[in-house]
């Protein structure tokens, strides 16, 4: 079967690999439909291996070369004898986090923080950027007819964005700033708006500003021409916003977040910083500000996200900026997304070949 396989930095190959030949009693063979390229995949491509294992992964023994893809919709092709929650022909989305169920965090229901966490498409035998994959039944959520194949591939990043906004305790009527309009920031703007918040988005890239402006759910600001904290404070008689969801992983954006939030407000660090950032922690004390981080999402959240999409409340498909065949994944996927002036936000790959 055809698959996009990570070998090392700048070395992702679309090649023929052996298709799965057996499935376990509680496993499911699926045919991926659409699969997104994630920031984590980009980091692996640019500078990896980072999270892809170079020695056998403690949870499942996987090592590079690794079939990529952890944001995908799929069709069920075959089920193991003990599988009861999905049937052949069902369309599904996969919650890709794999955990041991036994560690300190797993025993407290915090499975996304498992000390032996692995992930489909990063540290597992299979991934969504291939013609077939084998997945544990427990990872699958069936997509109702109202949710398209394309939307099904956006449940995973949709859950990341939702967890960030939820951690900001965003309530109807709140004023929220989202810094960064990459895929997660763009999705966070849709989700915060669906909660009834007034949403502002700050983004330096003109193409990304234009995409989010087109959603019609947020006022979009250019931080290179506007003093964002001053603008937002002016808007509310010097108070500032109720919550900021920092989705860029950029030092200046984090500083903007802390300067824009009101006293007793919340700043959530959802974007991943790749180097240390300098902040003035005195602001946290003086203004009773909560600075929180989020990692992935609660592993139980996918049915809820699918429900929101199904109800038309969370139009995740709006963040898609390109749909490409798997053969073009390096030139039109990875290389295009790494271009800082690039025009792409979320590229979805057709893995069917
Ligand atoms: Zn665990």
Image (cartoon, grey):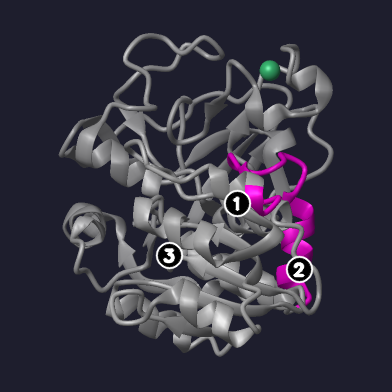
Q: Are marks 1 and 2 in contact (CB under 8 Å)?
A: no
Between disc 2 and disc 3, the foreground one is 3
> Ligand 1 is found in which quarter of the picture?
top right
Asked if one can make out residue 148 in the rendered structure from this viewpoint, the answer is no
x, y percent for residue 8 = 20, 29
Q: Which class describes the residues within 10 Å of circle 2: few (<14), some (14-19), or many (20+)?
A: some
Residue 309 among those drawn in magenta = yes
| Image quadrant assignment for residue 65 | top left
Report the residue at 72% width, 41% height from top. 298
Instruction: Tell me if residue 333 is in the magenta stretch.
Output: no
Which residue, given by chain and number where applicable, does mark 2 sit on?
308
The magenta stretch is: 286-311
Residue bearing mark 3: 180
Q: Nearer the viewer, residue 10 or 223?
A: 223
Q: Residues within 10 Å of mark 1 (few under 14, many from 20)?
A: many
Calculate the distance from the C-alpha at mark 2 to the C-alpha at mark 3.
Answer: 23 Å
Q: Which residue is mark 1?
A: 268
Q: Along the polypeptide, which appears first: circle 1 or circle 3? A: 3
Give the mark nearer the N terminus: 2 vs 3: 3
Q: Quadrant of residue 351?
A: bottom left
């Amino acid at each position: 079967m055809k698959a996009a396989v990570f070998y090392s930095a700048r070395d992702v190959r679309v090649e023929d690999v052996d298709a799965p030949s057996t499935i376990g009693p509680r496993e499911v063979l699926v045919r991926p439909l659409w699969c997104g390229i994630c920031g984590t995949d980009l980091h692996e491509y640019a500078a990896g291996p980072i999270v892809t294992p170079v020695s056998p992964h403690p949870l499942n023994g996987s090592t590079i070369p690794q079939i990529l893809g952890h944001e995908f919709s799929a069709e069920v092709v075959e089920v193991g004898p003990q599988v009861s929650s999905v049937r052949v022909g069902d369309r599904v989305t996969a919650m890709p986090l794999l955990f041991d169920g036994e560690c300190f965090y797993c025993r407290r229901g915090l499975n996304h923080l498992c000390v032996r966490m692995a992930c489909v498409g990063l540290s597992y035998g299979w991934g969504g950027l291939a013609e077939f994959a084998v997945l544990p039944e427990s990872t699958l959520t069936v997509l109702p007819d109202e949710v398209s194949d394309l939307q099904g591939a956006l449940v995973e990043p949709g859950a990341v964005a939702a967890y960030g906004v939820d951690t900001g305790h965003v309530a109807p009527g709140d004023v929220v700033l989202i810094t960064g309009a990459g895929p997660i920031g763009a999705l966070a703007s849709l989700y915060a708006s669906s909660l009834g918040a007034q949403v502002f988005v700050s983004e330096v890239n003109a193409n990304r500003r234009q995409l989010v402006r087109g959603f019609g759910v947020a006022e979009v600001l250019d931080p290179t021409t506007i003093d964002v904290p001053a603008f937002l404070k002016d808007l509310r008689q010097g108070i500032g916003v109720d919550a900021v969801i920092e989705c860029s992983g950029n030092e200046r954006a984090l500083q903007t977040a802390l300067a824009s939030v009101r006293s007793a407000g919340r700043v959530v660090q959802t974007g991943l910083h790749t180097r240390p950032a300098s902040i003035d922690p005195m602001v946290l004390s003086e203004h009773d500000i909560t600075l929180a981080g989020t990692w992935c999402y609660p592993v139980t959240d996918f049915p809820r996200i699918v429900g929101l999409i199904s109800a038309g409340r969370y139009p995740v498909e709006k963040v898609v900026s390109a749909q490409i065949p798997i053969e073009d994944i390096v030139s039109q996927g990875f290389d295009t997304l790494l271009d800082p002036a690039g025009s792409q936000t979320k590229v979805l790959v057709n893995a069917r070949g």
